[in-house]
Image (cartoon, rainbow, N blue to C red):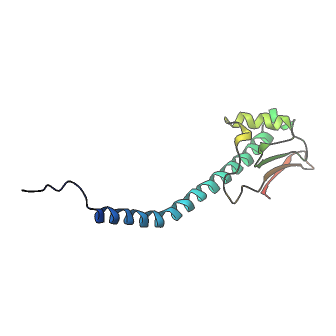
Amino acid sequence: MKHANKGFSLVELIIVVAILAILIGVLAPQYIKYVEKSRISADEDIAGSIFESAFVMISDEEYFDSINDGDTITFSSGGITSGNAAIMSALGVFYSDNLAQKKPKSKKYKTQTYTVSFTKTAKGDFDIFGDWS
C-alpha cells in the first residue's frame, strides 16, 4: 500500500512562516522610511506650488490689485488659508482640490506652518517670502 504525499509537513510550514517573518522584520522599517520620505516630498511640493502661485498672482493684473502689503498664505494643519478672499479665490483657480483638505502629512511638517508673505516694495511691486516655522 502506497501513501500519497498530500501536502507539506508542519516543519516545512513553520520554516516558511519564519522566513516570511524575518523578511517582514527587515523590510518593514525600510518601507516606513520610504513612506515618510514621500510624505515630506509631497509637503514640500505643495509648499513650492503655493510659492509659485504667489508669483503668478503678482504677475497677473487680475490678482495684483487685490493683494495688500502684509497679506499671507498659510499651509498648516488647518489646510491652505489666507485672510484675503481674492488670494483664496486665486488659489482655488490653481488647485482643483478643496484647499482645506491640503494638510501636511509628514512627521517633519505636521506641526509646522508654511507661510508665504507679500511685502510691498518702494517701487510698488511685491517681494514674496516663504518659510516653514
Q: Residue at the location (93% across, 50% down)?
A: 122
Work out whether 85 lies above or below 27.
Answer: above
| Residue 53 position within the rendered picture, expressed as x and y whole percent measured from the top left | 73, 43
| Residue 20 position within the rendered picture, expressed as x and y whole percent measured from the top left | 39, 62
Rendered image quadrant of residue 57: top right
Residue that protrudes farthest toward the front in the picture: 1
Image quarter where the N terminus lies is bottom left
As drawn, is 31 to the left or to the right of 36? left
As drawn, is 12 to the left or to the right of 97? left
As drawn, is 87 to the left or to the right of 25? right
Work out whether 86 lies above or below 131.
Answer: above
Front residue of this view, candidates 78 and 45: 78
Front residue of this view, candidates 50 and 17: 17
| Residue 37 position within the rendered picture, expressed as x and y whole percent measured from the top left | 59, 59
Rendered image quadrant of residue 39: bottom right
| Residue 51 position within the rendered picture, expressed as x and y whole percent measured from the top left | 74, 48
Rendered image quadrant of residue 125: top right
Q: Residue at the location (69% across, 60% down)?
A: 108
Image quarter where the C terminus lies is bottom right
Q: Residue at the location (66% across, 56% down)?
A: 106
Front residue of this view, candidates 2 and 105: 2
Residue that protrudes farthest toward the right in the picture: 122
Count of numbered tags: 0
